[in-house]
Amino acid sequence: MDEKDWHILTTLHDERNITRTAQRLYISQPALTYRIQQLEKEFCTKIVSRRKKGVEFTVKGEYLVQYANQMIYQLRHTKEHITNMDEAVKGTLRLGVSGLFARFDLPSLLKDFLKEYPQVDVNLKTGWSTEIQQMLQKEEAHLGIVRGDYSWKEHKILLREEKICIASSRNINFKELPSLPRVNYKTDPSLKNTIDNWWQETYTKPPMISMEVDRIDTCKELVLNGLGYAILPEICIQENDLLCVSPIKIDDNRFLTRNTWLFYRDVTLELAKVKAFIHFLNETKQEVVL
């Protein structure tokens, strides 16, 4: 059993499907099936059982998957430690980033960071903030950038605080909102709860949602074309957007806001590339404030 086998087991465990696993690993289905059969011979036990809807792991198969995950982690940790021993800022930096931050802020940040540290390679995965937090807990990422106030027991840095706004193609009065068509978009539970709680505290009627879309970009285009208003975080509103934007006030002194955080663990601070990225983000944040 070697590194390729570890990845076969863990990927098959994620997918529960021979075809999709073979596609992800860029190998043929017969080759994948043959390797599973060889592992079963090596350990003298059944690892998986085929079902109509995919494969199921046996108890012993589940144990081997746990072993494979541990070995992948140990090998990755060993490689990173050896690379880090000369204290050069190089190697692979694994980032888990909220999709919205990755869409609007991350590209320019990564461009500048890699210009300063050209020997660093970035392995990036994006998703909902809840998924990024899970990636950190599983140690699949060195650093996570999440949006919203999630519980995290280790290190975190506030990267930005932004207002949540009413966006429309014309000026509208907040009192009109319950009677106006609203365009909703798919978002993570944290932002949805923030908006829903504000609405319930402010209005006695539910919103008149006329359209629901899967992407915030689509929502913006519909709003730009006068098909309704939307409630958007500032991060996705650009200077050249022809939108009427009004931040939501909670009271005379406070706005409805959303925070973006950098999460990381103690153990990752041993890596020069992680320390360099944290320092870079802190410097960038200070420049923005100034």
Image (cartoon, rainbow, N blue to C red):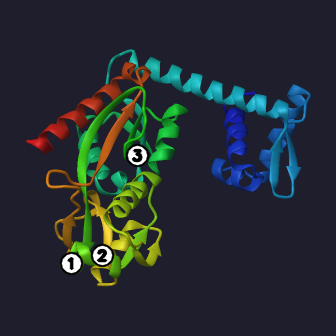
Question: Is 18 on the left-hand or right-hand side of 24?
Answer: right
At 46% from the left and 74% from the top, the residue drawn is 212
Residue contact at pointers 1 and 2, CB within 8 angstroms: yes
Comes first in the chain, label 1 or label 2 = 1
Q: Rate crowding at label 1 as few (under 14), some (14 to 19) or many (20 or more) other CA atoms within 10 Å.
A: some
Question: Is 94 on the left-hand or right-hand side of 60?
Answer: left
- Residue type (three-letter) at the residue carrying disc 2: Leu
Q: Which residue is mark 2?
A: 177
Query: In the picture shown, does residue 252 fall above or below 218?
Result: above
Residue 246 visible (yes or no): yes
Query: In the picture shown, does residue 107 fall above or below 201?
Result: above
Q: Rate crowding at label 3 as few (under 14), some (14 to 19) or many (20 or more) other CA atoms within 10 Å.
A: many
At 40% from the left and 46% from the top, the residue drawn is 97
Q: Which residue is mark 1?
A: 172
Residue 222 visible (yes or no): no
Residue 104 placed where, x, y %? 30, 57
Query: Dot 1 lies on which element?
Result: loop
